């Protein structure tokens, strides 16, 4: 988490090779996620794509940027599709496009098709497993299939700084929807992750709260508190 030093090395790399598409795209990600300098981030995404127009990873990351930061959904979809034309079996892009189809287009049949494609490409992709489970819970009401995916996601996620958000989401699903089976364990694990700084800012857990309330969760106030702690900036 030495961001100043990281930026110094990004700049040095680009001084050595100014037209290295992957480095340009990675620096754009840094400017987006760490510096929150969105205009500069977009400039570097565009530079990367000028150098290598079919760079699948940059196309996919720029699509996420256009969705989450610019809210330019039509353009975002163009870039998702370009990314998948460039690399049709890239699990991360397939999964991100599935989230887009859920949240923005509300096209659930297409969503499920892309989750399945993502898992065909990479069966143990933990983030896709977790997001697909969330979709099955909130959009399909299929807790049984979701439970299987959550278990698989846990099996393929080693705890470290980068995986804390996903683990916290998984334990939240456990607490909100499987309370009778593992509520106490979920509460303990989720509390520990939140205390360690886990967060998924902006992840929409409102449908989970609504479903937990509908299913008469015995501690709905705690479900709401966990959701707020996980997804909202302090």
Image (cartoon, rainbow, N blue to C red):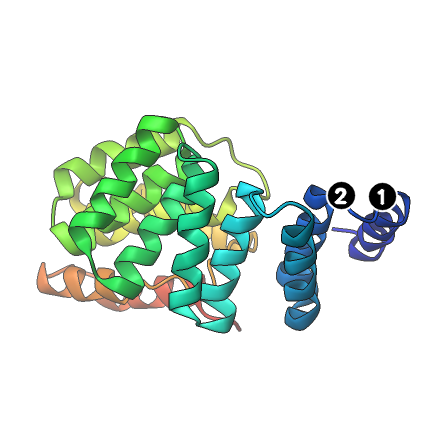
Q: Position of residue 182 (x, y in %)?
A: 25, 41
User: Residue under circle 2?
Assistant: 20
Q: Residue at x 23, y 60 (%)?
A: 208
Q: Position of residue 103 (x, y in %)?
A: 30, 62
Instruction: Classify mark 1: residues with Cα within 10 Å, few (<14), some (14-19) or many (20+).
Output: few
Q: Which mark is residue 17?
A: 1
Q: Is residue 205 above or below residue 137?
A: below
Asked whether 179 or 203 is in front, the reply is 203
Is residue 46 in view from this perspective?
yes
Is residue 187 in view from this perspective?
no
Q: Residue at x 37, y 44 (%)?
A: 95
Q: Disc 2, disc 1: CB below 8 Å?
A: yes
- Marks 2/1: CA–CA distance: 6 Å
Q: Residue at x 66, y 72 (%)?
A: 39
Q: Position of residue 153 (x, y in %)?
A: 36, 33
Q: Which mark is residue 208?
A: none
Query: How many numbered markers are drawn?
Result: 2
Asked which quadrant contains residue 180, the reply is top left
Asked whether 177 or 28 is in front, the reply is 28
Q: Position of residue 188 (x, y in %)?
A: 39, 47
2 vs 209, left or right, is right
Asked whether 147 or 81 is in front, the reply is 81
Instruction: Classify mark 2: residues with Cα within 10 Å, few (<14), some (14-19) or many (20+).
Output: some
Q: Residue at x 81, y 49 (%)?
A: 10
Could you say whether the residue bearing mark 1 is in a helix, strand or loop?
A: loop
188 vs 48, left or right, is left
């Amino acid at each position: 988490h030495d961001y100043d030093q990281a930026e110094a090395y990004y700049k040095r790399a680009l001084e050595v090779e100014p037209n290295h598409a992957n480095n340009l795209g990675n620096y754009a990600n840094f400017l987006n996620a760490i510096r929150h300098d969105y205009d500069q981030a977009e400039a570097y995404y565009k530079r990367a794509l000028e150098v290598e127009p079919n760079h699948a990873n940059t196309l996919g990351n720029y699509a996420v940027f256009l969705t989450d930061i610019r809210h330019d959904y039509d353009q975002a979809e163009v870039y998702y599709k370009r990314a998948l034309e460039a690399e049709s079996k890239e699990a991360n892009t397939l999964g991100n496009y599935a989230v887009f189809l859920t949240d923005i287009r509300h096209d659930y049949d297409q969503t499920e098709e892309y989750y399945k494609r993502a898992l065909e490409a990479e069966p143990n992709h933990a983030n896709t497993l977790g997001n697909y489970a969330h979709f099955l819970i909130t959009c399909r009401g299929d807790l049984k299939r979701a439970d299987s995916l959550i278990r698989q996601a846990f099996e393929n996620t080693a705890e470290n700084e980068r995986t804390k958000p996903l683990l916290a989401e998984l334990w939240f699903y456990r607490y909100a929807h499987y309370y009778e089976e593992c509520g106490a364990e979920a509460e303990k694990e989720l509390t520990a992750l939140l205390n360690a700084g886990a967060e998924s800012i902006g992840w929409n857990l409102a449908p989970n709260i609504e479903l937990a309330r509908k299913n008469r969760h015995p501690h709905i106030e705690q479900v709401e508190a966990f959701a707020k702690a996980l997804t909202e900036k302090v």
